[in-house]
Amino acid sequence: MGLEVCKAVDAADDLELVARVDQGDPLASVADAGARVLVDFTTPDVVMDNLRWAIGQGISVVVGTSGFSEERLAQVRTWLSEKPEAGVLIAPNFGIGAVLMMQFAAKAARYFESVEIIEQHHPRKLDAPSGTATHTAKVIAAARAEAGLGAMPDATKEEFDHARGADINGVRVHAVRASGLVAHQEVLFGTTGETLTIRHDSLDRASFMPGVLLAVRALVSRPGLTIGLDPLLG
Ligand SMILES: NC(=O)C1=CN([C@@H]2O[C@H](COP(=O)(O)OP(=O)(O)OC[C@H]3O[C@@H](n4cnc5c(N)ncnc54)[C@H](OP(=O)(O)O)[C@@H]3O)[C@@H](O)[C@H]2O)C=CC1
Ligand SMILES: O=C(O)C1=N[C@H](C(=O)O)C[C@H](O)C1
């Protein structure tokens, strides 16, 4: 993703790529180069250190790295309150189609008694389930709670470990890893006599770049914490 972002920024007429940082490179080179926005696609282990450093320097940050809990978001808000000029945008998925998939799923949630999420990724992915699937489960769970829906029907009494997937706020999420895949997700809804499947496929990492560039441009004049691309899409 880092390479893909560098290519996309380089190719944009209105943006200038001033620094590239890989593991082991000094972050100070970002500040020395006069960067106004830092884009972080690293790992959940290091992203918070990067964020703390960048916010401390007054540099805004676009974050694609997954692994953001409520506690992490609260920490970012605290850091930002000390640097009101800085902005941070954290998005579980920068693909426009993926953002729409999550919005459609939230809209459908109230009408179906059952829903499960099946995400599929390349086998080099470190985290499971994906940030996108986790976020989708949370927005579906919130929509179900708002509509007064209870637990989903499920008679399972005996199971091999994890056979029914991870339980995220009451929504089952299944993670598939296989060579050849990029990033894919299905949200499967069911109710009496019908199912609805909402599916999104990222077939190439270029799919994330329009969303990343949109966020970079917005953050030049958008202080505070923004979650997801939705507020930028109107
Ligand atoms: N929000 C979105 O739309 C998307 C989010 N992602 C997320 O982005 C993250 C990265 O994904 P991906 O690019 O596929 O993963 P990769 O493992 O291919 O890349 C991560 C890179 O970060 C480098 N790195 C590790 N530590 C640091 C550090 N301290 N400073 C700078 N660089 C560092 C790694 O170096 P090294 O190889 O030496 O360890 C590696 O090159 C994941 O969390 C993934 O889930 C991915 C795609 C889309
Ligand atoms: O690691 C990936 O590849 C991806 N990670 C993000 C996630 O965890 O949801 C976004 C997309 O699914 C690709």
Image: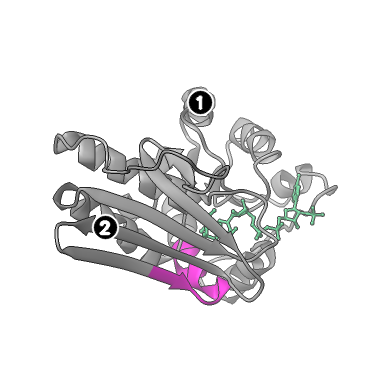
Residue 202 painted magenta: yes
Query: Which of the labelled discs sits on residue 71, or is there none?
Result: 1
Q: Main secondary structure of the magenta part?
A: helix
**Element assignment for label 1:** helix
Badge 2 residue CB within 8 Å of ligand 2:
no
> Dots 1 and 2: beta carbons under 8 Å?
no
Q: Quadrant of residue 125?
A: bottom right
Give the residue type at disc 2: Phe
The quadrant of the rendered image in which ligand 1 is seen is bottom right
Query: Which of the labelled discs sits on residue 49, or is there none?
Result: none
Q: Position of residue 40 (x, y in %)?
A: 62, 50
Give the residue type at disc 1: Glu
Q: Is residue 234 visible?
A: no
Q: Position of residue 139 (x, y in %)?
A: 31, 44
Q: Which residues are magenta?
A: 200-213
Residue 35 sits above or below residue 176 on the image: above
Q: Please name the residue that numbered disc 2 is placed on.
A: 189
| Residue toward you, 223 or 131 | 131
Residue 88 painted magenta: no
Q: Seen from this angle, which residue lies furthest front?
A: 158
Q: Residue at x 14, y 57 (%)?
A: 192
Q: Residue at x 64, y 73 (%)?
A: 7
Q: Position of residue 140 (x, y in %)?
A: 29, 45
Q: Residue at x 22, y 42 (%)?
A: 143
Quadrant location, the C terminus? bottom left
Badge 1 residue CB within 8 Å of ligand 1:
no
Q: Seen from this angle, which residue lies furthest right?
A: 24
**Would residue 58 be found to the left or right of residue 89 on screen?**
right
Alpha-carbon distance for marks 1 and 2?
30 Å
Q: Position of residue 131 (x, y in %)?
A: 50, 49
**Would residue 214 be found to the left or right of residue 148 on screen?**
right
Residue 170 sits above or below residue 181 on the image: above
